[in-house]
Amino acid sequence: MARHIYVHNPFCARKCPYCDFYSVTDCSCTEAFYKAAIREVELLGSVVDESTGTNPLTDIENRDTVYFGGGTPSLPDSSLICDLLKAVRKAFNIASDAEITIEVNPSSVTTEKLTAYHEAGFNRISLGVQSLDDEVLKTLGRLHDSKGAIEAIDKIRDAGFTNISADLITGVPGETLEGIKRDIKTFQELGIKHISTYSLMLEEGTAFYDRYNKTIEEYISPETEREMYHGTRAFLNELGYETYEISNSALPGFKSIHNSSYWNSCEYFAIGAGAHGFLGDLRYGHRDDVRAYIEEMNTFTSDDYKAFLEGNKSDLRSLYIEEELAQEDKMREVAFLRLRTTEGILLDEFKKVFGVEFEDVFDKAVKSNIEKGLLERKERTLRLTRSGLDLANIVIEDFL
Ligand code: SF4
């Protein structure tokens, strides 16, 4: 049994023009937010029993995980972050070998903060680099330059962290495959163990959507973007980084256990404004409203939380149920989450959990995608082919 906890830190120094994660730049309520988050942790911890928050599906590496994402968790004073982690560890009885990650930004992370995180028990850092090309960083509206990113990696290592992940964005106007390869090589030389490469998405409501939605192909055609994806992946593999999910590659022993818990349909708790969780049959979340979160958590009781998780409390200001999953929904989720992984769908595992053969449930979708060369079956696994990877969203649609 393992517990997984996601904590959303909803503050950023400036909004990046491509980002649609929930965050605010008015940080005047930062302290009140972290106080409310500790209260939420204590309330939730008091109402969940030992069997809540388990992994229903597979024999994946089964360790507790805590993940501080955002927003920019490295922006606030480190004492706020460390006190919240302390509360999480206590309330959820987190094991001493847990993977505990914090996302940090080169522009706000300092040696003092990193030392404090390390002492508090964080043992994995995810650094939002995005590129080591200053022109690309300017296009992305990032607050740091390549020198700042490299200095941040040095500081992270000096503070005692060995499990370090770095993010890159591919498909940015002006970016080239050669440039991405150069960045990856630098990461390897600097001891980065895990690399996430995200294709630039133009999300509605972002500044990039208005700027590039109609013109992106003038900068990077879909064919070039795909060449970049496969070229990046091949280069990562050449350097020993195994791609284990569409956007994630790691050296042996450094896969993200927390992220893997999502793709393995594990339950996870959600703490903080904008956080989303999955418990039992419920996908639930906190609305993107930090002030509503603070107000609600300050007046909430453990009985209120219990009632909410039992589905007996609606019309709340922050917490809400996104979806109640029936058995068929859970099977669909396994399909679309596991298809993102290179391991694919483990057919024996599926049968063990749901009591039916995957191919009986999704007969039409499996057959047609195998015929189109987008899916392949190898012994008792089903996974995307190289062409399937390019059309992953379309293949996944067939299973929904
Ligand atoms: S720092 Fe990260 S979370 Fe904040 S706006 Fe930029 S991309 Fe989004």
Image (cartoon, helix red, strand yellow):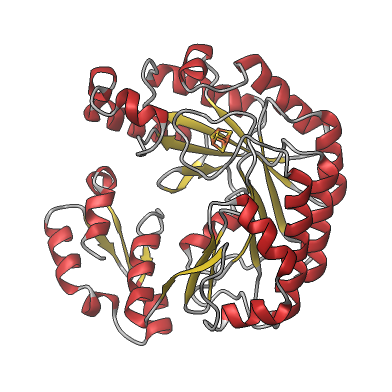
- Where is 372 relative to 178, above or below? below
Q: Position of residue 45 (x, y in %)?
A: 74, 73
Q: Tell me the quarter of the image containing the N terminus.
A: bottom right
Work out which residue is located at the far bottom of the displayed protein and give it.
Answer: 355
Is residue 387 left or right of 207 when viewed as pictured? left
Q: Position of residue 285 (x, y in %)?
A: 53, 63
- Where is 126 relative to 272, above or below? above
Task: Please tell me which residue lies in front, 349 or 209.
Answer: 209
Task: Please tell me which residue lies in front, 60 or 49.
Answer: 49
Q: Residue at x 77, y 69 (%)?
A: 42
Ligand 1 location (quadrant): top right
Q: How many numbered tags mark residues here?
A: 0
Is residue 147 left or right of 397 when viewed as pictured? right
- Where is 175 relative to 97, above or below? above
Q: Residue at x 77, y 62 (%)?
A: 88
Is residue 371 left or right of 122 when viewed as pictured? left
Q: Residue at x 18, y 66 (%)?
A: 365
Q: Position of residue 103 (x, y in %)?
A: 65, 41
Work out which residue is located at the far top of the displayed protein and give it.
Answer: 135
Observer able to see residue 64: no
Q: Position of residue 302 (x, y in %)?
A: 72, 78
Task: Please tell me which residue lies in front, 378 or 293.
Answer: 293
Is residue 39 left or right of 347 when viewed as pictured? right
Q: Quadrant of residue 347?
A: bottom left
Q: Residue at x 59, y 28 (%)?
A: 14
Task: Please tell me which residue lies in front, 222 or 35.
Answer: 35
